[in-house]
Amino acid sequence: MLHRFFSSRPLLLLCSVWLGICLWCSPARAESIDPYIRRYLDAAQPVPIKVDETGETRDFSAIELSKGKQRFDDGCLYCHIGGSNVPIPPITLSGENLAGATPPRDNLNGFVAFMREPMTYDGDDYSSWCRQVSENWMSRSELEEVAAYVLRAGEKVSSWGKKVYEVES
């Protein structure tokens, strides 16, 4: 009888269920934190990011910052490597430049508004250099993660937005 149990379908079913549970609970399934986030953005614990010009803040976890970095790497890195700005080199993603824009983009709401409807640095005209990020592409929360990553990098990474890349024609 014992021999029949170990060579039959119940054992196969039991092993399959056990394997499924092990894979479902494995640490590899957990969301990973980008090593750059821990090392350079000093985000082992949730970090406050300025929401608006009044100084209100919202905490972002290392996982949220990692997601923001991944989205930035996927959609923005080509023109903004290391916080630079290849299309318009003097205006980088440094905290100083973001704060100096009209309206300021050194907070979540300002940055998200710019990404939804890109304007020139002085705020007078639509900017065709930066692509518009629609709701179909990224939700508000996803775009806030990108903004939080950029703003935190501008605050913590001394070289962020400092290198100017000139494109030769």
Image (tube, rainbow, N blue to C red):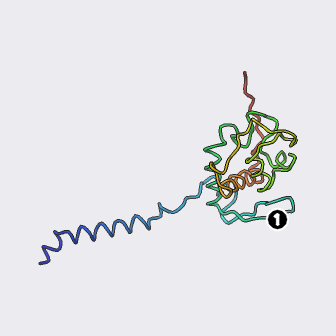
Q: Please name the residue that numbered disc 1 is placed on.
A: 56
Left/right of residue 66 with respect to residue 83 in the rendered view: left
Report the quarter where the N terminus lies.
bottom left
Left/right of residue 72 with respect to residue 93 in the rendered view: left
Q: Assess disc 1: are there few (<14), some (14-19) or many (≥20) residues with their C-alpha within 10 Å of its C-alpha.
A: few
Left/right of residue 119 with respect to residue 28 in the rendered view: right
| 28 or 169, nearer to the observer | 169
Find the residue positioned furthest to the bottom: 1
96 versus 167 height, above or below: below
| 163 or 109, nearer to the observer | 109
What residue is shown at x 78% (from left), y 41% (from top)? 92
Q: Looking at the picture, how far across and down is residue 59, in whole percent?
A: 72, 65
58 versus 143 height, above or below: below
Report the quarter where the C terminus lies.
top right
Q: Looking at the picture, how far across and down is residue 168, in whole percent?
A: 73, 23
Find the residue positioned furthest to the top: 169
Q: Looking at the picture, how far across and down is residue 111, in whole percent?
A: 77, 51
What residue is shown at x 75% (from left), y 35% (from top)? 128
| Quarter of the image where one finds residue 61 | bottom right
Q: Looking at the picture, how far across and down is residue 43, in whole percent?
A: 68, 61
| 84 or 53, nearer to the observer | 53
Amino acid type, mark 1: Glu
At mark 1, the secondary structure is loop
| Quarter of the image where one finds residue 75 | top right
